[in-house]
Image (cartoon, coloured by chain):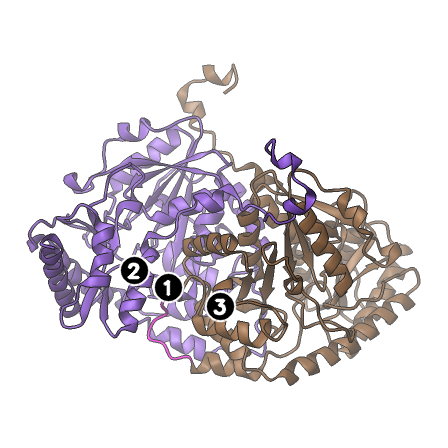
Chain colours: A brown, B purple
Amino acid sequence: MGFFESYLPAFVIRLTMPDISAKAIKVPSSAIRRLSPYSDRAEREGIKVYHLNIGSPDIDSPETVKQAVRNFDFKHLEYSNSAGIYELREAMLEKYYKRLGMDLTIDDILITTAGSEALAFTVETVCNPGDEIIVIEPFYTNYYSIACQYGVDVIAVPTVIENDFRLPGIDAFEAVVTPRTKAMLICNPANPAGTLYSKEDILQMGDFCKRHDLFLISDEVYREFCYTEDPYYSVMNIPGLEENTILVDSVSKRYNLCGARIGAIATKNKAVIDAITKFAQARLCPPVLGQIATIGALEAPVSYFESVRREYIKRRDFAISTLNSIPGVYSPMTYGAFYTIASLPVEDAEDFAKWMLTDFRINGETVMITPAASFYRTEGVGANQVRIAYVLEVPELKKAFHILEEGLKAYNSR
Amino acid sequence: MGFFESYLPAFVIRLTMPDISAKAIKVPSSAIRRLSPYSDRAEREGIKVYHLNIGSPDIDSPETVKQAVRNFDFKHLEYSNSAGIYELREAMLEKYYKRLGMDLTIDDILITTAGSEALAFTVETVCNPGDEIIVIEPFYTNYYSIACQYGVDVIAVPTVIENDFRLPGIDAFEAVVTPRTKAMLICNPANPAGTLYSKEDILQMGDFCKRHDLFLISDEVYREFCYTEDPYYSVMNIPGLEENTILVDSVSKRYNLCGARIGAIATKNKAVIDAITKFAQARLCPPVLGQIATIGALEAPVSYFESVRREYIKRRDFAISTLNSIPGVYSPMTYGAFYTIASLPVEDAEDFAKWMLTDFRINGETVMITPAASFYRTEGVGANQVRIAYVLEVPELKKAFHILEEGLKAYNSR
């Protein structure tokens, strides 16, 4: 209380209101969702908006999901085990992790309320407030939002569009390590740049983490969306790094079950999984209907992924070549996930994205894209870039990119 | 690093493993779930366990829940709005909050992943690390677990079984306020003691919070389980306290939908709801299938609650009178929720609860109860107390209490 306030009569103090926390002010609003009011308004006016802004694909979930939900017989919905329904943990282990050559048991796996909670649990388990996590820039914005909530700093190792987001040498990682660094967090394949790390990349990162006694957290929610012929190599496959590696997983993208909110954490580090179990108990259990849907999803045949993958390769090929054919646009080749970063011939991509929603239509249609600046921590980088999710069928993408091209012309000749 | 470590060669350092965070060590394991391995083992051996340990009642959810889930037609499960499905927020507003006389609009309401997330969002929004929240002891253990995760301290104002958990005068609250106190958190009606606060109690707490510029957070997840004839009076009904009050809500108990994981936050404080919206965006959305089930639940007729309430009054009357008829047991009258705290003629209720699961059976049956010590912060209090959830039908409760009575005799004459 300042000098003057301490002399104010009691009734004035009663008119004040309590403050919110520092992090409640610091945590950013979602870049991906910030433009939503403008697209909502356009849609209410009857405008068709092509949503290239969000990773919510148009592909059907496996038929087995709907069967599982419809056949689920319940009189009331009880809590499940805090670590998730046993049958689901078992199916994740047998149908995924073992096939990927991960040496895990059921006790190493905990079902979470989607990848978001898996990340939050992991961050609060490995970091004290003031600690640092290394990420590769551009990175999924919510890594920063979640770290903020636990007072943790995110330190970016830059990769740049001019160099097709190629991973720098390990000395770039060495350069940012401090005594407060506790972990490195990667997304493989990566949202938003579509990067896929090779076995050699992963082994180098593992060696770096081992050397500095860091946790290596790998967000593998796009693992089924890899477009090279190389077998997927996970941090969980690195020999001798079992105490350092933590897998963050989710079925949201894999089965197009974003709304189910089911993910998982897996680690051989017993202290980590024991601590996460305590955090999991404090929130009682993950959503039971989503778990039931996921048990159904795990019954899907392998052919489900094969056709989804073929479809995405087609979309990726079309998206990258078409984007690069637009004057002034550059988008590097991607090898995984279903996003690409493109640089546009504009100064302020957020202003352009907003303008597309408010001012530009072709035959009553427009396009929504995500400004990419918030995927960077390095000041000033990414202002002319957008993230594009190629989550629509090719004929739809074609119409959307045509609108984008015409929009760019119109915007630049205003 | 100590003197000796600094002289160790590099390869020894490479054999260490990274540490987990201080709070990952500090956060307690769930008292309610700690005994589960023993009950699991008993059940695997074919023993029937009467679960008086957890608030997961045997009452059916409304029929409209099952209809909503079965009729929900989806090709894939998309994200909902971060604040929840609009129709659900609207139904919560119209069917609850307005009827309870709360002056709210849709923008004041955000759907959460159950009451647990509503609490977590609220704590991180109103408190900085090191801040304090006042609670009334005994209190729901997870208040402490959640506070721990954000570096927040929980300060208990004691109420005691010897005085039937009656609220102390406001001077007991004044006595614990410090410059770090940011909020008071109540549960009304209260888990675990079954206390129901009167309008006068609530107005006094409101006045206290106003005077000290504190948030007043009210966990009202048991609101439909009140056993007096007085109309329910919420902190949200206090005139002039709109900027201080935050409602934490859940449909888990109300409709017996614990596994749906759907709750809500409501507040007129715009800074608070705006901050919570940012946290909500970072976890994308609440579970969609649970939201669909809840939209169904909200179609249930008022008669659903009337019959549930009548049933619980019957169970409560039976539970309290039977418990008090057991030699050495005392359990005060309760007026809400479906728990009661009972003191037992034992020194260590956790040891007794465990012994019941491992060593005591009548005709192949035993009883599981929750040791109450973890509901207290005051050292040494509650060691001889248990929490009993009267969530079974009277004939089942009768058998369970008989086993409890015989178990106490046998335990004390070992």
Residue B144 image point, x, y percent: 39, 44
**Which residue lies at the image location 83% right of the left edge and 74% below the top edge?**
A317
What range of the chain is rendered magenta? Answer: A72-79
Residue B47 visible to an observer of this rendering: yes
Can you say whether B218 is above or below B172 in the image?
Answer: below
Q: Which residue is mark 3?
A: A106
Residue B313 counted in the magenta span:
no
- Label 2 and label 1: CA atoms lie apart by 9 Å
Q: How many marks?
A: 3
Left or right of A378, for residue B218: left
Crowding near pointer 2: few (<14 within 10 Å), some, many (20+)?
many
Residue drawn 41% across and 58% down? A284
Circle 3 residues within 10 Å: few <14, some 14–19, many ≥20 = some
> What's the residue type where badge 1 is placed?
Cys
Query: Up-down: is B313 above or below B239?
Result: below
Q: Quadrant of residue B166?
A: top left
What is the quadrant of residue A99 in the picture?
bottom right
**On the rendered structure, is B213 left or right of B195?**
right
Discs 2, 1 touching: Cβ within 8 Å: yes
Q: Residue beneath label 2, please?
A: B55
Labelled disc at residue B258: 1
Chain identifier of the residue bearing label 2 in the image: B
- Please say if the residues under marks 2 and 3 sit with CB atoms less than 8 Å apart: no
Residue type for callout 3: Ile
